[in-house]
Structures are given as C-alpha cells and as structure tokens.
Amino acid sequence: MMNDKLVFLGLLYFIQGIPYGLQLSLLPVYLRGAGHSLTHISLTKILYFPWVLKVLWAPLVDRTCTKRCWLVGTVAGLALTCLVSATISPDVQYMGVAGSLLAMNVLASVQDIAADGAAVRLLRGQGELGLGNTVQVVGYKAGSVFAGGGLLAVIDVAGWGWMFALLACVYGGVALFVWGAPVLDGESPRGQGEGRRGSKDVMQPWKVWRKLLSVPGTPWTMFYILTYKLGEQGAITMFPLFLLDHHMTARELGVWNGVVAMAFSICGSSIGGFLLSQYSIGLLMRRVFMMRTVSMVFQSSLLVVLEPSALMKGMAVLSLSLQHFIAGLITTLTFTTMMNCTQRAEESIQATHYSFLATLEVLGKLSFSALAGGLVDTVGFPIAFILFLFLTSSSALHVWRATETGILKEQLKEQPQ
C-alpha cells in the first residue's frame, strides 16, 4: 500500500515540475541568446505568479468536489494546453509562448493544492512523511529535468511542436492513471452540509486565515520559508548566467546546469529522505545550513576569474553540483517541516494550510529571483553575491537559534520512529 502511495504521489509531482523546468532551463538561455538583459530575463519569473495566488482558491479546492476530480480536471487541462503550445512558433510568437506557460502554471498550481491535500491525508507517521516528501521533491525535480534539461538538449532535433506533443501525451496518460488510482478510493465526496459550510468559509476568508495562523508552529514556519532560500535562489539564478557570459556555451550550460546539477539536486533530496529516518530534523537542518554557507563562499570566490579555462570550468561544475546537492537536501527537510506543521491543523483546512505555506515558499523565492537580475545589472556580480552570502548566513543563524531556543529545540533531540 505504501508503494502505491509513493508511485501515485511521485507521478503527480513529476508532471507538476514540468512547467517549472521549461521556465527554469529553457527561457533564460533562450532570451540571453537573443540578447536580452538580465533584468528582462528575471522579469519572466512573473509567469510563476499563479503559485503565489493559489492560496486564494485553495479553500475552494479543499471544500468542494473530491481530490480525484480536481486532479483529473487539471491534468487533462494541462494536456490540452500542451497541444495548443505545439502549434505555436516560439521564434515569432513570444507572447503566445508566455501565455501558454502562464496557463500551465495556473493549472499546475490548482493541481498542487489537490495533490498536497491528498498527500497530507495519505501519509501517516514520520517514516511515511520522510519518504513521501522525498518522493514529492524528487518527482518535482525529475519533471523539471525531463522538461527543461531534456527539451533544451534536443529541441534542435525534435522541434518545438513535437516536444509539446510528447508532453501532452504524458499529461494525458497521467490523467487516466489518476482517474483509476485505487489509493483515492477511500475519499468520500463532500456532503451538501459540508459544501454549504465550505462555501460560507470561502465567502468569509478572515475565518480561514484565523484558523491557519492559530495552528501551532505556523508563525515561525512562515518566516522561515519566506527567507530560507533568498541568498541561494539569487546565486542559483545568476551564477549560470555569469558562466554563460564568460565560460560556457548555451549547450554546455544546458547539460551541466540543466541535467547534471539537477541530478545532484535529486540525489540530495533522496539522501535527505534517508537521513530523516536516521536523525532528528533539527540536527540535520543545523548542519546542512552551515554546509550551504561554506558552499556559497566557494562559489562567490569563482566570480573573480573571468578568463575561460578548463580548470575554471571544472571548478564551476563542482560549485553547481555542490550547490544543487545541498539545495536538494534543504528542500526535503523544509517540506517535511511544513507538513509536520500542517498535520497539527484540523483536517478540514489541512490542504489550505499546506498550500498557504507552499505559497509563501514560492513567494520568497520568486520575489528575490525577479530582483536578482536588476541587482546584478546595477552593482555587478561580486557585490550582488556578497549580498547573497549575507542572506545565506543569516538563514543559517536563524535555524541555529531555533534549535537552541525556538521551535526546533525539541526536534534537535527527538529521534525518528
């Protein structure tokens, strides 16, 4: 039964990572190759905005229909959107491409609410939580690699239209799988009385917010997820573009940053799930955040080298690999922390609570990613990376203090069961 849950959740999060992969690996390199500024490239992050707004319609998904209905409907919608995208020429219809990716993000954000709600209901106990969150993170990143790294590497051969036709087939197949998935058989439809109460709560959102904020541990978790990736996200966004300007071609960057580095990220996320079954989450977070700070120091030191060389390229690949490996570890730890917090909420608002936390997590990354390019254009790479390093160090200090006196203190000594 546990394997069925993991396969089901893995497929959902795999297809959920596809729009992110397209935008993370394809659009920046495509636009930079066309001569666009870093500021312009950073502003494309606005296509992620539906992920910030999803908390507004999360109560509707939480209180109406079943998770199966929402999942099948959104995944089928993604299949249709990909079919439309296959007819677009990206060279001359840039706004059409942006519109298609925006639609994919809207549908994927609704799918995410339903998938998170299903995960919170299906996973029980710390062992299942660790494995479930590992599958969530790894599946999402695998979808990102499949769409972003794979598409960037073979688009010259297969063509834009055929690639999106393939994605439409993938989405269509998953929609059929979810329709018949037995793991959702125990889910009961919303009754009329519950539907009326749900509609009333949707019309009175302040009651929902009051319930969300009253869940134990929520205020600390909110601040943490808003800030834990600020410095890292700036570096992950800008360092590949520094390499594109000075040391690597777009094709090389697609391989090393779009595939190899993401493979290290997936490896880090997978190991994170294993470590959660062996050590307390507080102890892991304290050590891994210190490792990330050291990794950021190493990457920042490479910015002084502007002349291309085999040694510099090797050091850059090492830095990217370490950075993504540690980022994968931290992401698994963070999503486990979020789900632990959500499971303290009453069942009727769990999907909304988790979506609220996930929205803040995206908002923290999105806001700084959108500003990072303008910052680099204004002050240059070295000074910008000093700021990234400061933010990374501050996040490590915040986690360390939480293990000493705050919410992670008890979890520092707590051993997994």
Image (tube, rainbow, N blue to C red):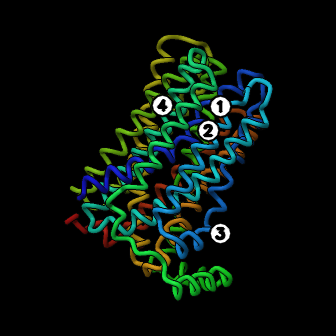
Q: CA distance from mark 3 to mark 1?
A: 31 Å
Residue named by callout 2: 82
Q: Amino acid at mark 3?
A: Leu
Which quadrant holds the C terminus?
bottom left
Residue named by callout 4: 320
Query: Which circle's residue, 1 or 4, is located before the other in the chain?
Result: 1
- For residue 56, the mark is 3
Query: Which circle's residue, 4 or 3, is located before the other in the chain?
Result: 3
The front one of 125 and 231 is: 125
The quarter of the displayed image where residue 91 is located = top right
Q: Is residue 147 above or below residue 207?
A: above
Q: Count residues near mark 2 (Cα–Cα under 10 Å), then give few for <14, some for 14-19, many for 20+.
A: many
Q: CA distance from mark 1 to mark 2?
A: 6 Å
Judged by depth in the image, the label closer to the viewer, 2 or 3, is 2
Q: CA distance from mark 2 to mark 3?
A: 25 Å
Location of residue 238 in the rendering, given as x and y in whole percent from the top left corner: 63, 34
- For residue 117, the mark is none
- Name which residue lies at 41% across and 66% down: 339
Q: Are marks 1 and 2 in contact (CB under 8 Å)?
A: yes
Location of residue 389 in the rendering, given as x and y in whole percent from the top left corner: 56, 44
Residue named by callout 1: 86
